[in-house]
Image (cartoon, rainbow, N blue to C red):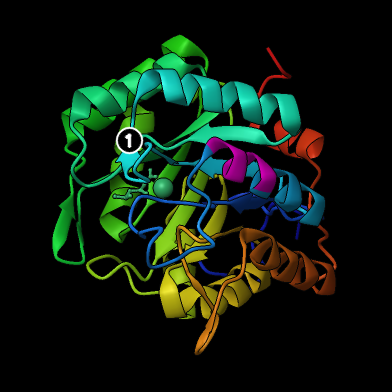
Amino acid sequence: MTNDTPAAGAAPGPPAAKPTGPGTLITVAPTGAESQKSAVPALPVTLDELVTTAKECQAAGAAVIHVHIRDDRAQPTLDLARLTDTVAALRESTDLIVQLSTGGAVTDGFNARLAVLDAAPDACSLTCGTVNFGDEVFSNPWPFIRDLYARTKERGVVPEFELFDLGHVATLHRLLGDLGAPHGGHVHCDLVMGVPGGMPGDAATLVQAVSALPPGATWSATGIGRTTLPVMLAALSAGGHLRVGMEDTVSFARGRPVTGNAELVERAAALAELAQRPPLRPDQARALLGVNGRR
Ligand code: KMH
Ligand code: ZN
């Protein structure tokens, strides 16, 4: 038997997504578009709060920050001047890879979401399909996905493919088949699990989704709300990376609100250490994801 010969009993089918190596990429998603500051006082909504959180999260082990911003009334906005200032401020104060959300809020239009790339971030999220989102719909039709992906390639922005459902994995394959590899050459996905309307946040679903990813892709996972811990533990055991933050959960434990994003990153980093896959530094994360050095 050669190294290329599957062992007896090995599952047939395409090669699995790339093993994720010795380190763990930790992405922090500190704000999101759904929680209200009035209900969650620890949510970072001003630029100062965001920069402070970002610095704390980098110190705790994060390498990527997934950014949604708010306006003066703490409501979600895609205002381009604010986004541009935010990218500059995060670059000034941290080494984190700055990934802007192109998902925005469910109320944001497609043109405003496409224009996010004009703020010239290192990276952006790119959701690969429409999904029910609680009582709302997070709309991502194929022509929008295709336009956004083409634009990431033109602008030299590294996309992270957000997968809320197994059908989104099929669309990711279609996208890569039609338009080729992303800027930077590497495919990195984020499984967003446990959204009411999306795939459930459990180990069996995670394994199924990972087995369908393109060969060579790396992936992280995040579990919304009470699926945070099961998804994090399943992702670590399956060789994946982690996304945590107050976009995804505002409870640290049952009945105990999150006091700040850093404690969520600290918990993820401690579990990654326990798994003997310590957090990747931002420079290591840049190499993994194919993100350019600072422009
Ligand atoms: N706020 C959600 C509707 C993304 O950032 O790309 C979409 C979202 C995904 O958070
Ligand atoms: Zn987001």
From the viewer's perspective, is residue 157 above or below residue 284? above
Residue 69 pos. (x, y %) = 43, 39
Judge from the rendering whether residue 265 lies leftward or rightward of residue 201; answer left or right: right
Q: Amino acid at mark 1?
A: Thr
Cβ of mark 1 under 8 Å from ligand 1: the answer is no
Segment tinted magenta in the rendering: 47-52
Residue 219 pos. (x, y %) = 56, 52
Residue 139 pos. (x, y %) = 18, 44
Residue 118 pos. (x, y %) = 41, 14
Few, some or many residues within 10 Å of mark 1 (<14, 14–19, 20+) = some
* Residue 102 seen in the figure: yes
Residue at the location (34% across, 43% down)?
73
Residue at the location (36% across, 60% down)?
35
Q: Nearer the viewer, residue 235 or 102?
A: 102
Please, which residue is most extreme toward the bottom here? 254
Q: Nearer the viewer, residue 74 or 277?
A: 74
From the viewer's perspective, is residue 68 above or below residue 43? above
Q: Secondary structure at mark 1?
A: strand
* Location of residue 7 by image quarter: bottom right
From the viewer's perspective, is residue 70 above or below residue 116? below
Position of the C terminus, as image quadrant, is top right
Q: Nearer the viewer, residue 4 or 192?
A: 192
From the viewer's perspective, is residue 48 above or below residue 155? below
Q: Nearer the viewer, residue 164 or 90?
A: 90
Residue at the location (21% across, 22% down)?
111
Residue 51 drawn in magenta: yes
Q: Main secondary structure of the magenta part?
A: helix
Position of the N terminus, as image quadrant, is bottom right
Residue 216 drawn in magenta: no
